[in-house]
Image (cartoon, rainbow, N blue to C red):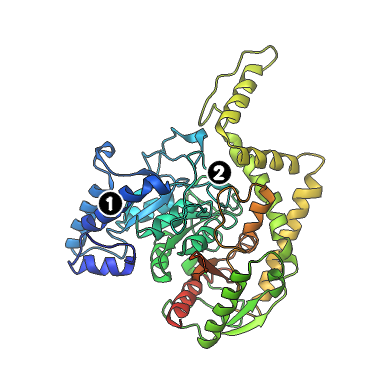
Amino acid sequence: MLDVKDLTIEKAGKMMRNGELTSIGLVSACLKNIEEKNKELNIFLEVFSGSAFGGDDALEQAKKADEIIKSGKGGKLTGIPIAIKDNILINGRKVSAGSKMLENYTASYDAFVIKKLKEAGAVLIGRTNMDEFAMGSSTENSAYGPVKNPFDTSRVPGGSSGGSAAAVATGMCLGALGSDTGGSIRQPASFCGVVGMKPSYDIVSRSGVMAMASSLDQIGPFAKNSEDAKIIFDTIVGKDEMDSTSVDFTSQSFSSGPRSGPRPLGKALSGSVIGVPREWLKDGVDKEVLENFEESLEKLKKAGYKIKDVLLPYSKYALAVYYILMPAEVSTNLSRLDGVRYGLRKEGENLPGRQAGVFDTYKKSRSAGFGAETRRRIILGTYVLSHGYYDAYYNKAWKVRHAIEKEFENIFKDVDFVMTPTTPTTAFKFGEKSDPLQMYLSDIFTVPANIAGIPSISIPSGFSKENLPMGIQFTGPLFSDESLFAIEKDLRENK
Ligand code: GLN
C-alpha cells in the first residue's frame, strides 16, 4: 500500500499526471489511515466515504479527478485529498463547528474556498474536529471529545484547528483547511509538526465560513511543507463578490519593508532582515523552545539572513486587546443561534408576560447547545459591549489595536519579517490548562498578526527531547504572504 505519510502534494500531483499513481489509489491510502487511526485520535468528525453520499463521496470524487487527469486537464490539486475544518460550509453536508448547537445542521451552499477547491479538482475527504466555534487552543472545547496529538496521545494537538493539523501529520489527507482568529492554524501546526499559514486579512473570502470574530478570522492552509501550503493558498485566494471586504491579492503589492513586492517561492530570501522582539521571550517560554529558537536563528544566519533585535511595545498588549474585541464579536455573531433561526431547539415554557415563551426557548436552547467556554465568551463580550463599559473596554481596545497596526507598519520599514517561536511551550497534556487564562497565554505569539491583519506562518523547527514537534513563526507586512512560504524552503535546505 502507498505510504502517504511523507508524500507531498507536489510529488503526488506529478506522479498522478505521469500515470504512476491514481487519485483512487491515493484517496484509498488516506482512507485506510483514517480507518486505522481515527477511532483513537478522533481527528475526523465525519469521513466522506460510503454510499450515503449519493455519488459524491471521496472515492467518487477521486474517480472524476482521475478522468480529468487522464484528459490532460489536471492541475496541481486535482485528485489531492484535502480535509476541511468543521466550520467551513460544503453544500449538502453537515457542518457543526464542533458544537452540539449545530449537530444536525446541513450547509445550503459552498463556501468560496470550497468552490475553489472543487474547481481545482481536489478531493474533499472529510470534516475535521475542532474547538467549539473555533474557541480554544487544544480541541478540549469540542462537543465531540478532543483530538489526540499523534506524537503523544496524552497531549493536545493544539487548537482550534487541531483536527486539520493532526490529519495532515498522520497522512489522513495531504493538505487541510483551517481557520485562524488568534492562532488556530499556526499553534496546532506547531504542536503537530506541519506548516500552517494565516494569510493577510481579506485576501481569502470569508463567505461560507462560520464567523467567530469577523475582524480577525482568516482561512488558511495546512500542509507538510511550504510548497504544498502555497499550492492550497494559490487556489483559495481571490476576490469574491459574496464577501464585500475581500480583496484581489494578486493586484496588491506591499510597499513597506527594506525590499518590496512579493517574492516568488523558490527564490532564496538570503539577505532579508529578520526582526526578533527579544522582550517577548523573557517570561513564560520553555527553555527547550528558546534553545530551538536560537538554533533556528543560527541556521537562518548561515542561509544569509540578517538578524536584528526589534522593540514592539504596543504589541505586548495584543492578547489583552484580543480578549476584548474577540468576545465582543463572538457575542454578536453567535446571537443568531437562538433555537428559532438556527440550531438546536429546546422548547420553552409558556410563562406569563410578553414574549416570555420565546425568551425561555432562547434560554433553554442556548444553555443546552453551547459549551462552557462559548458561554464564557458570550458573557464577556456582552459585558464589554454594554452601555456602561463600552468606552472603557471595547473602544479603548480598538485604539490600542490601531496602535499595534501602526507599530508593525513602522517595524517593517526596518526589517522584512518578525520571528518568534510559534508557541511558548510544546504540546501540553490534556487537562493541564484548566485555568482559562493559562490556556489563553498559549496564543501570546500568534495573536498580534490577527490584531494587525498581517500574514504569518508557522514552520516546523525540530523536536523536543520528548519527541514533540516545535515550530517557529514568521510574520510579514500586509500582502507579503508569498515571501513567507519561501522562508520555510530556505530553512529546510539549510539544515
Ligand atoms: N486559541 C484562540 C482562542 O481561543 C484562537 C482561536 C482561533 O484562532 N480561532 O480564541
224 vs 256, left or right, is left
Question: Is residue 43 visible in this depiction of the protein?
Answer: no
Say the numbered circle drawn on residue 32.
Answer: 1
Using the image as rendered, state which of residue 135 and residue 468 is in the foreground. 468
Q: Residue at x 56, y 62 (%)?
A: 426
> Farthest residue in the front direction?
466
Using the image as rendered, state which of residue 82 and residue 413 is in the foreground. 82
Q: Position of residue 459 (x, y in %)?
A: 50, 69
Question: Is residue 412 visible in this depiction of the protein?
Answer: yes
Q: Position of residue 277 (x, y in %)?
A: 68, 74
> Which of the two discs, 2 and 1, labels the residue nearer the N terminus?
1
| Quarter of the image where the N terminus is located | bottom left
Element on which disc 1 rests: helix
Q: Is mark 1 within 8 Å of ligand 1?
A: no
Q: Residue at x 49, y 61 (%)?
A: 189
Judging by the rendered image, the residue that carries numbered circle 2 is 141
Element on which disc 2 rests: loop
Q: Residues within 10 Å of mark 1 (few under 14, many from 20)?
A: some
Q: Position of residue 404 (x, y in %)?
A: 71, 65
Q: Position of residue 327 (x, y in %)?
A: 66, 46
Give me the C-alpha separation between circle 2 and circle 1. 28 Å
Using the image as rendered, state which of residue 373 and residue 191 is in the foreground. 191
Q: Residue at x 40, y 42 (%)?
A: 109
Report the amino acid beneath label 2: Asn
| Quarter of the image where the C terminus is located | bottom left
Report the amino acid beneath label 1: Lys
